[in-house]
Amino acid sequence: MSWTSALTHISPYTFAAIGIAVSIGVSVLGAAWGIFITGSSLIGASIKAPRITSKNLISVIFCEAVAIYGVIVAIILQTKLESVPTSQMYAPESLRAGYAIFASGLIVGFANLVCGVCVGIIGSSCALSDAQNSSLFVKILVIEIFGSALGLFGVIVGIIMSAQATWPAKA
């Protein structure tokens, strides 16, 4: 049995469900990882300079936004699912729709994983730098915003990819 025949005999709904799960699950993992990185540095740096605690919570919020991106795309992908008759389950159009939702979920999930780690590391640097020199906060925050844009790029690509998910018309 070849890979092609194996992939064409797996239900497109299975691929779509895995894509939706990866979108939300890996995005939440990225957010949690970023919050862990930022939060641990923020707690450590706030011992030296307690004034930074409330100001640097913006970094934790940026990390949490990554999880929200995954939830939004998962909802969008869920709305793309449609029922098709059993006779058209493995039609090329059904397979394409399942693969499109799967690929969209993978792209969004892993883009948000990398984004969460990126924002977490920059947020950590922001907290540590702000504890040393408060004039650096806004400068590093701008860099953190650019890091957060990586997640939005993943969301945009995921939405564009999911536009290819059209299921066969019911007979």
Image (cartoon, helix red, strand yellow):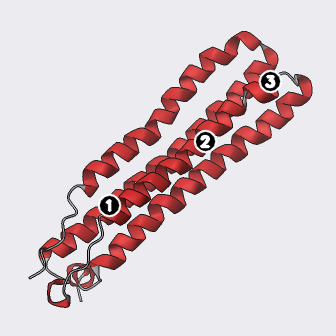
User: What percent of the width, then of the height, locates residue 43?
Assistant: 83, 36
Q: Which residue is mark 2?
A: 63
Q: Quadrant of the C terminus?
A: bottom left
Residue located at (64% from left, 44% from top)? 34
| Left or right of residue 65: residue 47 | right
Distance (Cα) linking label 1 and label 2: 23 Å
User: What percent of the width, then of the height, locates residue 58?
Assistant: 66, 31
Q: Which residue is mark 1?
A: 103
Q: Which residue is mark 3?
A: 52
53 to 33, vertically: above or below: above
Q: Residues within 10 Å of mark 3 (few under 14, many from 20)?
A: many
Name which of mark 1 and mark 2 comes first in the sequence. 2
Q: Choose top left, top right, bottom left or bottom right for residue 129.
A: top right
Q: Residue furthest left?
A: 171
Q: Residue furthest top?
A: 135
Q: Nearer the viewer, residue 169 or 54?
A: 169
Name which of mark 3 and mark 2 comes first in the sequence. 3
- What amino acid is at disc 1? Ala
